[in-house]
Image (cartoon, rainbow, N blue to C red):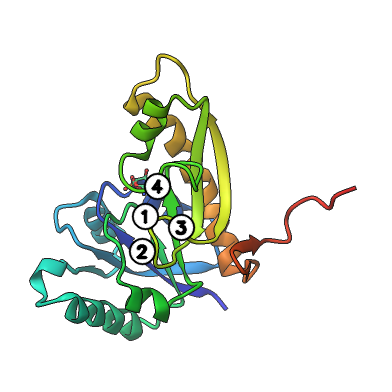
Amino acid sequence: MRKRLALFGSGRGSNGEALYRAIQHNRIQGDIVLIISDIPSSGIVEKGYSWQIPVHVVDPTNYGNEEVWTQAMLDLLEDYKVDGILLAGYMRMLPPTFVQVYRGKILNIHPSLLPAFVGLQAQKQALVKGVKYTGCTVHFVDEGMDTGPIIAQAVVPVYEDDTVDTLSTRILHEEHRIYPEAVGLFCDDALEIVGTRVLTGKQAVRK
Ligand code: GRF
């Protein structure tokens, strides 16, 4: 059965677009049935309209408190019978009560090799630290900041003349590759969470 997916984003939506294209090319056995954004003017909202996918702007500042905001999102997801949630540049922490309902069904992409460089400006953090390699990570979302079980990672070199822009572009290229792959596995029910780890059954058998 194809999975019904909700896409959450706050920004330009390039990962959302990579996922949308992968679905169109039949590389993901699921469909984006709903887009939720907290920023009405964001690229992901515009893209959603152009793809003719229902878009809902849910701005927490329009709700009295966290509980009301959380319930509004849960009601929407219930209405659309959502099986999985894909965070793609969604710039807010989801409340713990929300995460509890969809545990093991919320995926996120982060532009670093977690657990290094959590939170905002991960590419800048990598440059400041002087690491020689960084990358991106797809992970399940738990109550922490970028702390959930890791599904997939890609490594990217850091060059001495990199700027935040050049490094971000190099990482983004890999994001657009591994996020659709990971979502494909999720939709195939090929991801097993075992404690803090995710088994995909895809890794080479050790000799
Ligand atoms: C990406 O770098 C993603 O890893 C991070 O936010 C950025 C979103 O970019 N979480 P886009 O909106 O998908 O283009």
Label 1 crowd (10 A; few <14 / some 14-19 / many >=20): many
The mark nearer the N terminus, 4 or 2, is 2
The mark nearer the N terminus, 3 or 1, is 1
Ligand 1 neighbours mark 1 (CB distance < 8 Å): yes
- The residue that disc 2 covers is 7
- The residue that disc 4 covers is 118
Mark 2 vs mark 3: give the one in front: 3
Q: Amino acid at mark 1?
A: Ala
Along the horizontal axis of the image, is 94 left or right of 184? left
The mark nearer the N terminus, 1 or 2, is 2
Mark 3 vs mark 1: give the one in front: 3
Label 1: state its secondary structure.
loop
Residue furthest to the top in view is 161
Q: Is residue 61 above or below residue 138?
A: below
Q: Are marks 1 and 2 in contact (CB under 8 Å)?
A: yes
Q: Amino acid at mark 4?
A: Val
Label 2: state its secondary structure.
strand
Label 4 crowd (10 A; few <14 / some 14-19 / many >=20): some
In-front residue for pair 76/130: 130
Residue at figure coordinates x 48%, y 72% from the top left = 105
Position in image of residue 139 (x %, y %): 50, 57
Q: Are marks 1 and 4 in contact (CB under 8 Å)?
A: no
Label 4: state its secondary structure.
loop
Q: CA distance from mark 1 to mark 2?
A: 7 Å
Position in image of residue 102 (x %, y %): 43, 77
Mark 4 vs mark 2: give the one in front: 4
Position in image of residue 87 (x %, y %): 38, 60
